Amino acid sequence: MSESHDPNCIFCKIVAGAIPSKKVYEDDDVFVFHDIEPWAPVHFLMVPKAHIPSMAHLEDKHAALMGKMMVLAPKLAAEQGCEPYPEGGFRVVCNTGAHGGQEVHHLHVHVIGGPRPWKKG
Ligand code: AMP
Ligand code: ZN
């Protein structure tokens, strides 16, 4: 399964509203919600609504989707309280595969920020 809904996937369930989440943003392609175990004062996850297991599964047709998430990240980071660049800013992380530390196999982009120290990272 790659390009739809995986009934066993926790992030597909969050996108569908079957598991509750603290929603930050939603459009036709992207769903954004707060990480349940935040590392930092700001920590949200951006996911495609389609079930794409990881960055390793990306194809040329996904370029606009990934671009949309990258352009959205700074806007949502600011809305969530990240202070402006360069004194503030945020970190963007997309763990991929076992060596990349990926635990949930639905592509997600972590956006992490706020004043330090952080719990991790
Ligand atoms: P990783 O796959 O290692 O990049 O990270 C998965 C992230 O998903 C972790 O930071 C978890 O805290 C987060 N997470 C797992 N389950 C939920 C959930 N139900 N709601 C929000 N975040 C979650
Ligand atoms: Zn999924």
Image (spheres, grey):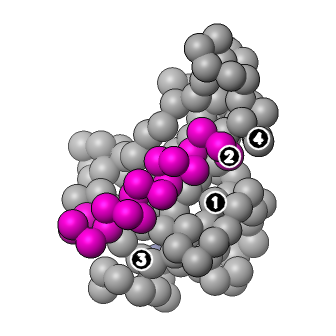
The Cα atoms of the two marked residues, 3 and 1, are separated by: 14 Å
Residue 61 is inside the magenta segment: yes
Name the residue located 57 percent from the left edge and 50 percent from the top edge: 72
Indicate which disc residue 76 carries. Answer: 2
What distance separates the C-alpha of mark 2 from that of mark 1?
A: 9 Å
Task: Return the disc, 1 or 4, that comes first in the chain's sequence.
Answer: 1
Q: Amino acid at mark 3?
A: His
Badge 2 marks a residue whose secondary structure is helix
Q: Which mark is residue 40?
A: none
- Is disc 3 placed on a helix, strand or loop? loop
Q: Is residue 100 visible?
A: yes
Range shown magenta? 58-76
Nearer the observer, disc 3 or disc 4? 4
Identity of the amino acid at label 4? Gln
Reading the chain from its start, which is encountered first: label 3 or label 2? Answer: 3
Tell me, yes or no, whether the two marked residues, 1 and 4, touch with CB atoms within 8 Å.
Answer: no
Q: Is residue 25 above or below residue 99?
A: below
Q: Earlier in the sequence, mark 3 or mark 4?
A: 3
Please say if the residues under marks 2 and 1 sit with CB atoms less than 8 Å apart: yes
> In x, y percent, where is residue 81?
78, 33
* Label annotation for residue 32: 1
- Reading the image, the residue beneath label 3 is 51
